[in-house]
Amino acid sequence: MNWNKLTKRTGALALCAALTVGAFTLPAGAQGVTAQLSPNLSIVVDGTARTFYNVSGTEVHPIAYNGTTYLPIRAIGELMGKNVNWDQSTLTVSLSGTRTTGAVTGTPDTAAVTQNVTADVRSDVTILVDGVRQSFTDVNGNAVYPLIYNGSVYLPIRAIGNLMGKTVSWDSATSTVTLGGELLVTDADSFNNTGAGQNNQNTQNTQTSSNGLITEAEAQSKALTHAGLSESQVSFVRCHLDWDDGRQVYDVEFYTSDYKEYDYEIDARTGEILSFDYDAEYYSYTQPSGNTGSYIGESKARSIALSYVSGATDANVRYARLDYDDGRAEYEVKIVYGTMEYEFEIDAYSGAVISRDSESIYD
């Protein structure tokens, strides 16, 4: 299910993440503005309502300013599993590494009411995520900057959605801002998408590095094992650490000498293969001459596809149908097994697999 995009209402709605910095000293030249403390707004992340606290255990509430809603950045750092640091000398907030401390808890501020407050728009505050400087815009492409209120740094919700790789939606009937995707949990210590009774070949024994993540070499090895190839048979295009829906993943891409391309997304903590795509680039097949050529048939196409999904049976095949792509006859086969969905393109004459990919049904 695709979440409705946050596009319009009285202004572009946005969320923010906050860093409490204790005795915060504001440099001269700060632009003071009137904003609105908005405890009436509900914030839901991956299906769970969230309450945010500063390092002292005091609840911090959303702030609305200029048609945009903001939240404290330290709390978002907790959701992303990152350490949050404030450098007073450079006015820089850094989100980096793997968080080693748990989320701060406190006493809910049930007495809070909607009211006007004074905040500071800070175009001179820098936000770094894993060493990369971030800039933010509203839905119209206009630059937006962090706010500082009561010793906390805030960012707009649209910026937070981008940083966490999440879709943002707004429910005016309940005054609720939602970030996330269908049935996705991102604050677990590990992820297991194995269906009942399914032997998941992707969750092999994994050694993790000191930061709790597998290494690039291990991610590459898992992809090669799944593809049934050795390192000498392929050329790697990329293998880099990234964020997807609040989860750290390795994007791995490589190809063989005969132009077969493989793309993997691998959970950086568990080593689980989250999605996979294979394409036989520049594939072409010449139909047998005369009347000797015949299609392999849907039954054979189903059998070929099932051979790539260990444990699946014919009952898991959602469809197998003949189609034409660029004048080439091919069978399209879809299999749903456990929590994964698999799609295949199979040459109708030779039975060669032209492309195949898989992804979680919850993505």
Image: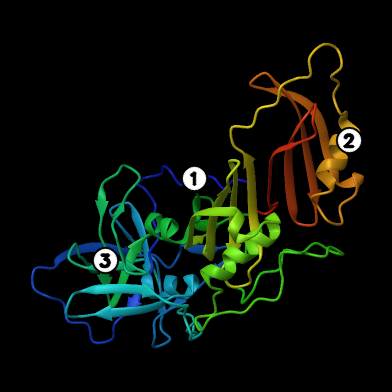
According to the picture, the residue beneath numbered tag 3 turns out to be: 147
**Mark found first going from the N terminus, 3 or 1:** 1
Observer able to see residue 116? no
Q: Secondary structure at mark 2?
A: helix
Q: Residue at x 50, y 51 (%)?
A: 169
**Residue type at numbered disc 3:** Leu
According to the picture, the residue beneath numbered tag 2 turns out to be: 300
- Rounded to the nearest angstrom, the CA distance separating label 3 from label 1 is 24 Å
- Rounded to the nearest angstrom, the CA distance separating label 2 from label 1 is 42 Å
Q: How many marks?
A: 3
According to the picture, the residue beneath numbered tag 1 turns out to be: 5
Residues packed near mark 3 inside 10 Å, few (<14), some (14 to 19) or many (20 plus)? many
Is disc 3 in contact with disc 1, using a CB cutoff of under 8 Å? no
In the image, 85 versus 330, the foreground residue is 330
Observer able to see residue 228? yes
Q: Residue at x 42, y 56 (%)?
A: 162
**Residue type at numbered disc 1:** Lys
Q: Secondary structure at mark 3?
A: strand
| Position of residue 77 measured from the top left corner of the image (x, y, whole percent) | 42, 73
**Residue type at numbered disc 2:** Lys
Q: Residue at x 53, y 80 (%)?
A: 209
| Position of residue 258 measured from the top left corner of the image (x, y, whole percent) | 61, 41
Q: Which mark is residue 235?
A: none
Q: Nearer the viewer, mark 2 or mark 1?
A: 2
Question: On the picture, is 190 further left or further right than 163?
Answer: right
Q: Residue at x 91, y 45 (%)?
A: 315
| Position of residue 11 measured from the top left corner of the image (x, y, whole percent) | 35, 46
